[in-house]
Image (spheres, helix red, strand yellow):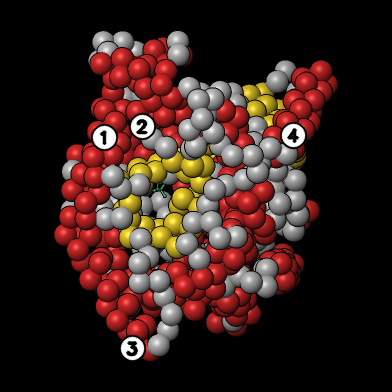
Amino acid sequence: MIVSCVGIGVGAASRIAIGEAHLLRQGPVCVTQSWVTPLEVDAEIERFEHALKSAAAQLQTVRGQIPEDAPSDIVEFIDTHLLMIEDKAISSGVMQLIREQFFSAEWALQQHRDALVAVFEQMDDTYLRTRRDDLDNVVRRIHKILMQPEEDHQEPLRDKIILAEDLSPADVIVLRNEQIAGFVTDYGGPMSHTAILARSLGLPAIVGARGASYCLQHGELLVLDTRHGCALANCAPSVLGYYEDEREFQQERALLLRKHSTEPAVTADGHSIELLANIELSSDVEAAVLNGADGIGLYRTEFLYMNRRDIPDEEEHYAAYREVIDGIGGKPVTIRTLDLGADKQAMHDHLRSSGGNPALGLRAIRLCLKEPELFRPQVRAILRASAHGDVRLMLPMLTNLWEVAQAKEVISRCQQELNAEGIAFDPAMPIGGMIEVPAAALSAQAFAEALDFLSIGTNDLIQYTLAIDRIDDEVNYLYDPFHPSVLLLISQVIKATAASSKPLSMCGEMAGDPRFVPLLLGMGLRSFSMQPAALLDAKQQLLKQDLSILRAKAADFLQHLHKQDPLSMLNRW
Ligand code: PEP
Ligand code: MG
């Protein structure tokens, strides 16, 4: 019998993955009280020492796999954990509890960890709090080794399908480097940055499949069908054969489409449309070029801040931007200033959002304006990069016009500094902003007049318009890009920006969603930015469109928006 777990599919070019399941247990390990007999003490101590050695060996392996160009802090982070494992203050305390209290190794470790944490907590110091997180991380690793069968510890993850309760965007980057085939999570929504990153990396995934990490078994063969949002186990040979053929067909189709990557994106009635790529890592520029992007419409630079404990400096920003500029070959590169916060958290304590509602908190431009010393190195690096290509700076999450004025002040001070230092930059580098908050959408014309270009971020625009946390799978069903208010806001932004004659693009997920492309064209949008893997399909779709017909259809659609179901109306186009 097929076992199936249903969630929301996340996939771009590759929609099918087939691979062995690998269960990634995160979160706290449940340790119960347990004892050994006096005769078992020596063996228990040996078991603990063996677990310490295995934990150290695991970390050494991870350390050896870190790419050379990875931030040095990832290495430091692992070294801190290695030092803790080797620290006698930790191991001798545990062994004493085994010897004197006859505790099992797991229970002794838990007791000793609780005693150490109690000391940390009394000290109320940010640095020590970080140490406590490190301690927990190390203890969790040793516990897992003590409690899991030996053969699981060092299993390579290549071609595996990861099962996890949840994964952060930072986890996905690490797993991608391990060359996994895909993943399934119990929690999370399709618009979370974890899902967006998976799409962008062409990694098939199912998110929000409640209970999947419990129903599906470690080691069994899984099929991920992201188009239908299901993970299948225990498939009959005929079903497996069907999916293998389908996967091959998709791979061949992608190769075929790639042959057309350099052809221009022109509609059937001769209008040129700009197709840009969204990227998260500088190395993603390769996929953008391969899929024929007209440039980078959104570079999510906050990914530079993940999986590390410090903050990237100006040189590191500059090197990443140069990699993208050099890779894209003279085409435009829109660098979005950092949008940390909500589900994109840095490990650095200072940058972690606190409070119960991070999506509404100190995020993106708010954080940058509050912490100019965080913003400045990035702005200087973008300016320096602008001397080497067609660079545009884009401000995220604008809500108030004064945020534009304040950001421009920081930019102009950086320009003065660079001038004084004799460092080259493009003084005419365009400064644009994202329209992703309803307040900004309603005032789009004023933002267009204050800036050189705009880009609609539909992922957040939907979240904030409909009051739906985009990462909360409990309210996923309410995250509705077809909601009339969302469509009206988009149409209003397109009209308002056209009135100011400033360029407008869209870089939210709607831009790469074939269900919306004809409508957006009909509304007047001429520039679309999407994950690289979606570009070739989008171009095929564009080639068949006739804008004069779409304009009339879009006008009629907007007029009847509240009278009929938007999805069924669009399906009839
Ligand atoms: C958006 O909100 O639509 C967007 C592109 O930004 P992000 O997904 O990074 O929040
Ligand atoms: Mg956004």
Q: Give above or below for 61 relative to 466.
A: below
Q: Nearer the viewer, mark 2 or mark 4?
A: 2
Distance between the alpha carbons at the discs numbered 1 and 3: 41 Å
Indicate left or right for 242 with 569 as reference: right
Disc 1 beta carbon < 8 A from ligand 1?
no
The residue positioned 60% from the left and 60% from the top of the image is 329
Distance between the alpha carbons at the discs numbered 1 and 2: 8 Å
Secondary structure under the numbered disc 4 in the rendered image: helix
Q: Do the residues bearing badges 3 and 2 touch, measured as CB atoms within 8 Å? A: no
Q: Do the residues bearing badges 1 and 2 touch, measured as CB atoms within 8 Å? A: yes
Residue 228 percent location from the top left of the image: 59, 23
Disc 3 beta carbon < 8 A from ligand 1?
no
Q: Circle 3: is it few (<14), some (14-19), or many (20+) Cα within 10 Å?
A: few
The answer to which of marks 2 and 4 sits earlier in the sequence is: 4
Residue where numbered disc 3 is placed: 420
Amino acid type at image mark 1? Lys
Residue where numbered disc 4 is placed: 256
Residue where numbered disc 1 is placed: 495
Residue 172 percent location from the top left of the image: 57, 52
Amino acid type at image mark 4? Leu
Secondary structure under the numbered disc 1 in the rendered image: helix
Amino acid type at image mark 3? Ala
Distance between the alpha carbons at the discs numbered 1 and 4: 37 Å
The answer to which of marks 1 and 2 sits earlier in the sequence is: 1
Q: Circle 2: is it few (<14), some (14-19), or many (20+) Cα within 10 Å?
A: some
